[in-house]
Amino acid sequence: MTMLVASINLVAAFLLTFIRARTFHHLVIGVVPALGAFAFALASLLLDDEMQAGVAQVIALALLGVSATLARKLPPRTDLFGGKR
């Protein structure tokens, strides 16, 4: 379940970042936390210990929240080009 949520968030972060801003800086800000969440969700699937898997899932969910917050706060594309498209 965590892997599904992380995958959906990763795709959403990519799409939202490309829609809002098209610079590399904004791409990194919007997508890196989602990639981290994806990695932690994958790690939680591979870990045998339930405690370690639970910690990895909590970290993944925290990174999902960070990614969603940062991607939402990106300026619109018009701000990057001085109000012109």
Image (cartoon, grey):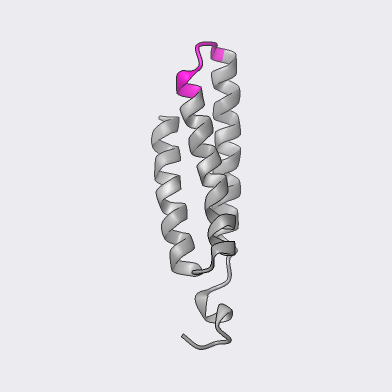
Q: Residue at x 45, y 39 (%)?
A: 6
Q: What is the count of numbered marks?
A: 0
Q: Is residue 47 left or right of residue 70?
A: left
Q: Residue furthest top?
A: 49
Q: Is residue 5 or residue 21 the one in the foreground?
A: 21
- Please say if 60 is above or below 72: above
Q: Residue at x 53, y 68 (%)?
A: 23
- Quarter holding the N terminus is top left
Q: Residue at x 59, y 56 (%)?
A: 29
Instruction: Residue 79: name its quadrant.
Output: bottom right
Q: Give the residues drawn in magenta, as a range.
A: 44-50
The answer to if 85 sits in the magenta stretch is no
- Residue 20: image x %, image y %? 49, 68
Q: Is residue 65 or residue 43 the one in the foreground?
A: 43
- Residue 34: image x %, image y %? 52, 45
Q: Residue at x 42, y 53 (%)?
A: 12
- Please say if 80 is above or below 36: below
The answer to if 47 sits in the magenta stretch is yes
Q: Is residue 83 left or right of residue 45?
A: right
- Residue 28: image x %, image y %? 57, 56
Q: Residue furthest front?
A: 24
Q: Is residue 23 or residue 68 the one in the foreground?
A: 23
